[in-house]
């Protein structure tokens, strides 16, 4: 099946789907996992390209995917939705799901969990044998314990699936670029709508409308703030009205076209007057951090080496630094997490940047004593020689003076 992206390039979605399923199976083999039971709707979509009520499914174990190392991929679909995944070359069979949740079963939840485990175990034994190693994620504890009681060794499926998702194919990168381009159109509309008197929520809705209209899925967070609410970061969009000459900062966090994440951050100035010297300084420092750290990353560089060479945050901004220096990105934020040098000993882990990883490089600059803050971030592709910048939405020339 061919589909079009924003740049009008053709995407072979069949090739994308089969590549992703093969990636999952390769990593399963690497970690000695005979079968995976995927409940996370993003992982279900990655492995099969089946999409159905992703937000609902994130908190309700009402659909799941059986992926054996060898054998048929079986989608267990929500009641009344069996038709949605018909025709996908990644799925061999569609069956009705057994929803093992308290909402669905009430006080009979333990019986429902045992029923789910018995029926699931029968499928695992049929296709993987009686001593299978089974990777599970996002399932309630009772169901996991009931499945373990069937005699299988249960492991976490996150490791092989996250490793699989980290590397993108060339055809997959067309999907990523499509999502970023569509999100940039949404951010352009949002920027155009900035004016004193509009509320943060009204402004944030502009991005949502543009993303949905272009075939995207949803925005994962509500990270848009203005004025003093830009510091500290992680304040969600509110009904506060934007005032003249304030900064307006956002992080897109868009699950966009083809299910791929578009993740970049920008900070704007509301006008009508020119930015102040303090606003320009915050912006300059954040811009410097992002670009310094982008220059370090290339295939073969270790995560530890990156941390050691990363930009040193000035002391007055260190307390309110962003919790990561950079992170992987695909259908959501994903492996790896890259930590600041001062945080590496406590939180960091080593690894190596590989070609066709997609990485977001982050900066948040705001003083501990208050005032405004600036959030900038770039969405990039790792190559042998450095980073290809995917998020080409321009920075603000008036704030870089």
Image (cartoon, rainbow, N blue to C red):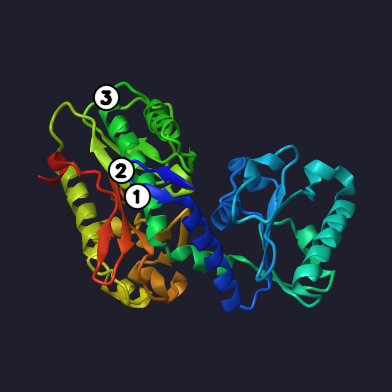
What count of labels does the image hold?
3
Residue for point 40% across, 49% down:
11
Q: Provide the residue designation for mark 3.
A: 195
Q: Provide the residue designation for mark 2.
A: 7
Using the image, determine if residue 213 lies above or below residue 312. above
Calculate the distance from the C-alpha at mark 2 to the C-alpha at mark 1.
Answer: 8 Å
Mark 2 and mark 1 residues within 8 Å of each other at the beta carbon: yes
Location of residue 235 in the rendering, given as x and y in whole percent from the top left corner: 42, 41
Q: Residues within 10 Å of mark 1 (few under 14, many from 20)?
A: many
Left or right side of 140 for 258: left
In the picture, which quadrant includes the C terminus?
A: top left
Using the image, tell me which numbered label, if any, was put on residue 177.
1
Of residue 66 and residue 271, the one placed in the foreground of this image is 66
Q: Residues within 10 Å of mark 2 (few under 14, many from 20)?
A: few
Please tell me in which quadrant of the rendered image residue 5 appears. Answer: top left
**Secondary structure beneath disc 1?**
helix
Mark 2 and mark 3 residues within 8 Å of each other at the beta carbon: no
């Amino acid at each position: 099946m061919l589909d079009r992206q924003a740049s009008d390039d053709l995407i072979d979605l069949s090739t994308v789907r089969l590549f992703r399923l093969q990636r999952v199976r390769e990593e399963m083999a690497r970690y000695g996992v005979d079968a995976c039971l995927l409940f996370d709707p993003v992982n279900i979509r990655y492995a099969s390209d089946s999409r159905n009520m992703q937000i609902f499914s994130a908190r309700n174990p009402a659909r799941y995917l059986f992926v054996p190392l060898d054998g048929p991929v079986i989608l267990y679909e929500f009641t009344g939705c069996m038709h949605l995944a018909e025709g996908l070359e990644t799925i061999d069979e569609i069956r009705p799901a057994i929803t093992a949740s308290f909402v669905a079963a009430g006080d009979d939840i333990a019986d429902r969990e045992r029923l789910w485990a018995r029926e699931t175990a029968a499928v695992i034994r049929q296709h993987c044998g009686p001593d299978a190693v089974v990777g599970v994620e996002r399932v309630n504890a009772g169901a996991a314990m009931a499945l373990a009681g069937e005699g299988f060794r249960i492991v976490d499926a996150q490791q092989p699936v996250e490793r699989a998702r980290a590397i993108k194919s060339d055809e997959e990168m067309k999907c990523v670029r499509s999502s970023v381009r569509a999100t940039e159109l949404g951010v352009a509309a949002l920027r155009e709508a900035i004016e004193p008197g509009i509320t943060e929520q009204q402004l944030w809705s502009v991005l949502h409308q543009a993303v949905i209209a272009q075939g995207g899925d949803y925005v994962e967070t509500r990270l848009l703030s203005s004025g003093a609410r830009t510091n500290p970061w992680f304040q969600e969009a509110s009904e506060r009205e934007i005032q003249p000459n304030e900064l307006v900062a956002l992080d897109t966090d868009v699950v966009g076209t083809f299910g791929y994440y578009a993740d970049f951050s920008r900070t704007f100035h509301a006008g009508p007057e020119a930015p102040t010297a303090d606003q320009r300084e915050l912006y300059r420092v954040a811009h410097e951090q992002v670009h310094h750290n982008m220059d370090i990353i290339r295939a073969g560089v270790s995560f530890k080496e990156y941390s050691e060479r990363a930009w040193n945050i000035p002391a007055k901004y260190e307390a309110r630094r962003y919790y990561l220096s950079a992170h992987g990105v695909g259908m959501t934020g994903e492996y790896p997490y890259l930590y600041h040098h001062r945080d590496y000993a406590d939180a960091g882990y080593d690894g190596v940047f590989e070609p066709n990883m997609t990485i977001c490089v982050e900066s948040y600059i705001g003083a501990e004593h208050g005032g405004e803050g600036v959030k900038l971030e770039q969405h990039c592709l790792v190559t042998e020689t450095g980073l290809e910048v995917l998020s080409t939405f321009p920075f603000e020339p008036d704030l870089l003076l």
